[in-house]
Amino acid sequence: MASIESLLNPIAPASKACSPTPTSSSPTTMTSRSPRQKRQKVVKDQPSFKKANIRGDLRYPPHEERDGELERIHTQFQLHPLHNIANFPAHIPYCSQKKSFKGRTGRGSLEVFHYTFQIPNGDGKKWVVSWDYNIGLVRTTSLFKCTQHPKTAPAKALKMNPGLSKISHSITGGALIGQGYWMPFEAAKALAATFCWKIRYVLTPLFGLDFPSRCIPPEDSRFGDMRIDQAIILQATREAAYYRGLELAASLHPQDTDQDRPYVRH
């Protein structure tokens, strides 16, 4: 018969007494956990390329027609997206404390297309080409930087071309991707032709297939002069006034779609 003491103080079996209690730090538990994925870092001065719908009129579409040789060059420069640029429009609100952009354009945002490219055998930097597909403003800052011009080059180019500064915009606030000098389309095209020889072929999605033939080669005395025909600036001034008129009319009569029609160039 068991004693009272043995009943009150039973001895645990050896197998149970010696078995360790599992803890959360055991190898089995640790290996079963999935590693935490790192959040991808967003580069603030690069486009996100998210599919979206176009806002307003598409007056300045991308030029994506290319032959085999141009396709080879675009691939060499890692142009992205290589196709269907218009599938990735971006909306950039104007957030600067300066009110000149809205006052001179009647708009509170930029509606843009982007694409990027890299210089072959370069430092791997992605250069961003951007333009407003509604009214044709082109962000020229990256064109100057890519061709190794100083920071003051855009302002200098504006001073060399009377009237151009009145229809161009220096945006300093808001999203980094929207900051810089924005110039009217035809003026930007003519200006870029004076100094963008080495990147002339990667600018065809923006300026069209005729752009490379319009570019001035480095051995030409006019290369880098940055003076453009005054007739181009006058025409760009008329277009800027026309587009501003459309925006003001649309704000007064938002239901009147007849006011929002493509500008006919003469």
Image: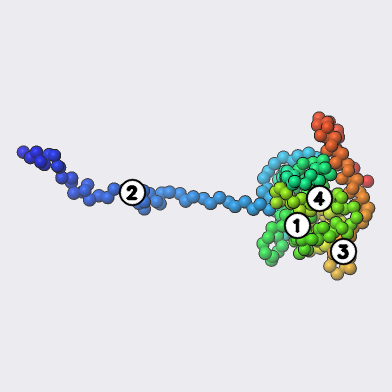
Kindly check if marks 1 and 3 are in contact, taking CB atoms under 8 A apart as contact: no
Residue for badge 3: 225
Front position in the image: 208 or 239: 239
The disc at residue 38 is none
Please provide percent x and percent y for residue 106.
82, 40
| Residue 76 placement, left or right of 29 | right
What residue appears at the point 77 percent right and 58 percent down from the top-left corner? 143
Quarter of the rendering containing residue 52: top right
Please provide percent x and percent y for residue 231.
94, 53
Mark pair 1, 3: CA separation: 18 Å
Q: Is residue 249 visible?
A: yes
Please provide percent x and percent y for residue 170.
79, 52
For mark 3, give the secondary structure: loop
Query: Which is in the foreground here, disc 4 or disc 1?
Result: 4
Question: Could you tell which of marks 1 and 3 lies nearer the N-terminus?
Answer: 1
For mark 1, give the secondary structure: helix
For mark 2, give the secondary structure: loop
Mark pair 4, 3: CA separation: 21 Å
Quarter of the rendering containing residue 152: bottom right
Kindly check if marks 2 and 3 are in contact, taking CB atoms under 8 A apart as contact: no
Query: Which is in the foreground here, disc 4 or disc 3?
Result: 4
What residue appears at the point 82 percent right and 58 percent down from the top-left corner? 155
Residue for badge 1: 142
Q: Is residue 116 above or below residue 97?
A: below
Query: Which quadrant does the N terminus fall into?
Result: top left
Query: Which is in the foreground here, disc 2 or disc 4?
Result: 4
Amino acid found under the numbered disc labelled 4: His
Kindly check if marks 1 and 2 are in contact, taking CB atoms under 8 A apart as contact: no
The disc at residue 169 is 4
Mark pair 1, 2: CA separation: 57 Å
